[in-house]
Image (cartoon, rainbow, N blue to C red):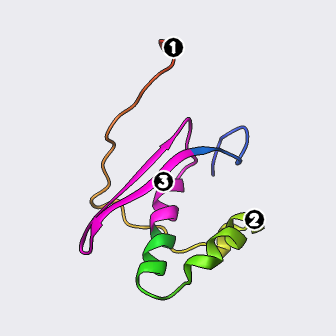
Amino acid sequence: SCEAPSPILMMNRVEIVGTAPALSVYVDGAAFLKYMVRTMVGTLLEVGHGRRVADSIPDLLASRDRSQAGRTAKAHGLHLVEVRYDRPPP
């Protein structure tokens, strides 16, 4: 159901800060797909819980197969921290 012109996006930074159970995941990019960050967090949670090995992430990304990723993390606790524009919006 994504309306993006392309599903290929570049992330500038993905950073995990803190220790369980109080973790923060910071994602910086120019654009995001629907549920993209929540899917990333769900997959990283699988790694943290030992249900997926961290070394599997590059192959997951290369496969471009969303069904191979982790469950979409719940929106509970999700916060938009900042929106920046390189130029004023139209």
Q: Which labelled disc corresponds to residue 6?
A: none
Tell me which corner region of the image, top left, top right, bottom left or bottom right, holds residue 9: top right
Tag 2–tag 1 contact (CB < 8 Å): no
Query: In screen coordinates, is 68 left or right of 26?
Result: right
Q: Which labelled disc corresponds to residue 62?
A: 2
Amino acid type, callout 1 = Arg
Q: Mark 1 points at which residue?
A: 87
- Residue at the (48%, 55%) spot, across then down: 37
Residue 40, percent from left and from top = 51, 63
Which numbered disc, 1 or 3, marks the residue closer to the eye? Answer: 3
- Residue at the (65%, 42%) spot, across then down: 3
Query: In screen coordinates, is 16 left or right of 62?
Result: left
Amino acid type, callout 3 = Val
Q: Mark 3 points at which residue?
A: 14
Most distant residue in the bottom direction: 50
Residue 82, percent from left and from top = 34, 35
Neighbor class of circle 1 (other Cα within 10 Å; few <14, some 14-19, many 20+) is: few
* Residue 30 within the segment the image draws in magenta: yes
- Residue at the (52%, 11%) spot, across then down: 90
Neighbor class of circle 2 (other Cα within 10 Å; few <14, some 14-19, many 20+) is: few
Residue 74, percent from left and from top = 37, 66
Q: Nearer the viewer, residue 19 or 29?
A: 19
Q: Which of 42 and 1 is in front in this view?
A: 42
Q: What stretch is highlighted in magenta?
A: 12-41
Distance (Cα) linking label 2 and label 3: 17 Å
Q: Which of marks 2 and 1 is nearer the N terminus?
A: 2
